[in-house]
Amino acid sequence: MAAFTELVFSGVQPTGNLHLGNYLGAVKRFVEMQARDAQCLYCVVDLHAITVWQDPEALRGQIREVTAAFLAAGIDPAQSIVFNQSQVPQHAELAWVFNCVARLGWLNRMTQFKEKAGKDRENASIGLYDYPVLMAADILAYRATHVPVGEDQKQHLELTRDIAQKFNTDFGSSIAAHGHGETFFPVTEPLIGGPAARVMSLRDGSKKMSKSDPSDNSRINLTDDADTIAQKIRRAKTDPEPLPSEIAGLKDRPEADNLVGIYAALAGITREDVLRDFGGAQFSAFKPALADLAVTSLGPIAGEMRRLTADPGHIDAVLADGAGRAETIAAQTLDAVKDIVGFVRRGPSLQTVR
Ligand code: AQP
């Protein structure tokens, strides 16, 4: 592997209804990361998807659809490593080691589990509870230094950092004895930010735009056509006031703030820039401008996704190639982890990973 200064990892679940929040909070930023001096790995996290029930045939299609979205948005599979998680067994293997490092008390604090399990906690899968540990394994199997994600993943990334630090401390002398210096896993940097780190529902500015919202009008799907996008923006909940000229004027106006953030992220400008252009405008003027921008930005992606998903063989070949390249890196990490932990394994003990 060429020497890069950064190693970037991120994933998206193939759970259907890929939406504008996933695009602006994650996929668009994955594309931007390719301009950095970084080896980027982008993963369709299918092991995470089955923490809640997935119809097997639908799941296969959804894995290909997320891959198509990656490619259509501009991820270059020759430059970045694009793959699905279940093809690289080291993710699950490292997750087991981390299950023995992470503490129950840490997982009990995870708010996403509480939200997703809801009142029926006893009936949630163990996988849903353990989700953040598998996520730590996804990231650290590559010893990734940077992880671009939406704001909802902040707490999970803090847990990844805790697991890395505890592993480095618990196994400190073994890490040194195997020639890795003082630490083996990096303390990963989350990259959360920009005007669309948390895109909200179009129907309720207090709720995150989400795949599982029963109302399709709450989100813009990446596969929506131009008319549907325009209609959803026209119907988006707003308040009766015109847009303010200053950011402070968006306080306590979650729906207005959300639409301004979406405009800024799509146009690649700041919220301040948007208010400079639209301050004082009514939503009847702002919404058509936003709809035009959304259609121009997302239309070509939807078209390319349709073209790509019509050829599943090509998508499967991209995933197989990416999985092979990912496994080469992850296998080295796992060999070193086994030596550090004290397992006996086939092949000579590694002194260094790189
Ligand atoms: N509303 C959002 N705004 C900004 N970023 C978002 N992300 C998700 N929703 C928003 C980011 O998208 C990436 C992939 O997310 P995921 O597929 O792994 O799962 P998720 O966060 O659980 O997505 P949803 O839509 O919210 O699904 P459900 O409804 O199942 O909970 C991540 O980087 C995430 O931060």
Image (spheres, rainbow, N blue to C red):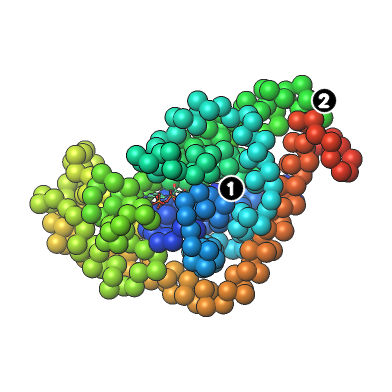
Instruction: In this rendered view, identify the residue nearer to me: 233 or 294.
Output: 233
Q: Secondary structure at mark 1?
A: strand
Residue 74 lies left or right of residue 342; in this view the side is left
Toward the left, the furthest residue is 240
Q: Earlier in the sequence, mark 1 or mark 2?
A: 1
| Mark 1: C-beta under 8 Å from nearest atom of ligand 1 | no
Residue bearing the label numbered 1: 9
Q: Secondary structure at mark 2?
A: helix
Instruction: In this rendered view, identify the residue nearer to me: 79 or 96.
Output: 96
Residue bearing the label numbered 2: 177
Q: Which mark is residue 273?
A: none
- Residue 207 seen anywhere in this rendered image of the structure: yes
> Which kind of residue does numbered mark 2 sit on?
Ala
Toward the right, the furthest residue is 348
- The location of residue 304, given as percent across then percent down, is 48, 73
- Which quadrant is home to the C terminus? top right
Residue at x 62%, y 73% (from the top left corner): 314
